[in-house]
């Protein structure tokens, strides 16, 4: 009898924790495992595990189940718009999980990051970045008049930019665009910049999709390439996105879409 009692007690103790119910709502159980899974999800999003968090999760799950049961009783879940929204949500969750699973199985490696960094560095070797000012106006003649006035010293670039430039970002700063490579700008603007030397201004207006520009190169210097450690997170994220794009493209190619 003692052995049977001991065996029975052991069986009770051996009942898995996840099978225990933490609450019952109108006869439907919420298990410890469901709470643990919810907590794990929140921890993955940055929350800290604690008794308070677990109690909040329990109350949240109870509240949700009460509301879901009420919705089902009212037939809300049978409405076509709701069914479509639920299906779209399901698809969105599956797509995100698929992408996360792919990246987990195909992570960006340090070798890939190094190779990308080397390629970018090689592409920038020998290139310059410029400290620029510009004046943007709508009409070509207005730009010509500004160039003539600056050359004859009837005005200064700074004064003309503040008075006439329609670029709100740089006009009030005397046309200052700061430092950057020519590739930061539209092709027509970039080509004009690369032809100018330090201290030079365009002798003729430059037309782009934005209007007519008067451009001055205040200074230039070789492009500064940051150390790998300083850009590694950005490169890793860029490569992650490239992997996902290729993954999606490959799936589309292999799918039978008619």
Image (cartoon, rainbow, N blue to C red):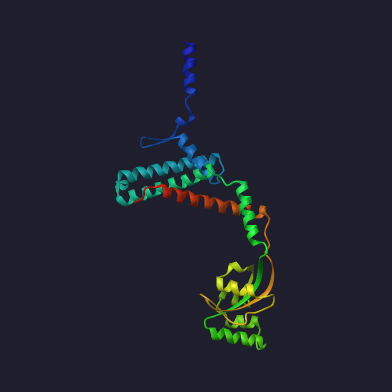
Q: Quadrant of residue 27?
A: top left
- Quick check: can you spot residue 157? yes
Establish if 31 lies above or below 185.
above
Q: Out of 31 and 85, give the one closest to the viewer.
A: 85
Measured from the top left, where is residue 215 in percent x and y?
Answer: 61, 77
At horizontal 37% and vertical 45% (from top left) the residue drawn is: 67
129 left or right of 49 in image: right
Measured from the top left, where is residue 253 in percent x and y?
Answer: 42, 50
At horizontal 53% and vertical 43% (from top left) the residue drawn is: 104
- Quick check: can you spot residue 172? no
Q: Out of 226 and 7, give the one closest to the viewer.
A: 226
Measured from the top left, where is residue 131 in percent x and y?
Answer: 66, 71
39 left or right of 157 in image: left
Q: Out of 184 and 90, give the one closest to the viewer.
A: 184
At horizontal 59% and vertical 72% (from top left) the residue drawn is: 191
Q: How many labels does the image show?
A: 0
Establish if 170 lies above or below 84.
below
Establish if 30 lies above or below 187.
above
């Amino acid at each position: 009898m003692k052995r049977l009692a001991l065996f029975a007690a052991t069986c009770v103790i051996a009942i898995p924790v996840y099978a225990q119910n933490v609450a019952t709502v109108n006869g439907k159980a919420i298990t410890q495992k469901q709470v643990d899974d919810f907590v794990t999800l929140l921890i993955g999003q940055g929350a800290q595990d604690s008794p308070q968090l677990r109690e909040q999760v329990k109350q949240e799950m109870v509240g949700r189940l009460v509301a879901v049961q009420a919705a089902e009783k009212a037939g809300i879940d049978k409405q076509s718009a709701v069914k479509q929204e639920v299906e779209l949500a399901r698809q969105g969750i599956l797509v995100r999980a698929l992408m996360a699973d792919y990246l987990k199985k195909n992570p960006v490696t340090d070798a890939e990051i190094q190779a990308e960094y080397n390629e970018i560095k090689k592409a920038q070797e020998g290139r310059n970045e410029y400290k620029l000012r510009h004046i943007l106006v709508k009409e070509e003649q207005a730009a010509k008049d500004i160039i003539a006035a600056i050359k004859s010293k009837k005005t200064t670039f700074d004064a003309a930019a503040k008075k006439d430039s329609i670029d709100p970002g740089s006009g009030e700063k005397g046309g200052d665009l700061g430092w950057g490579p020519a590739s930061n700008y539209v092709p027509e603007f970039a080509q004009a910049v690369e032809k100018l030397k330090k201290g030079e201004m365009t002798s003729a207006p430059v037309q782009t999709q934005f209007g007519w520009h008067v451009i001055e190169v205040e200074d230039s210097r070789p492009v500064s390439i940051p150390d790998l450690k300083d850009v590694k997170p950005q490169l890793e994220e860029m490569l992650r996105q490239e992997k996902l794009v290729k993954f999606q493209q490959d799936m589309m190619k292999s799918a039978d879409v008619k």
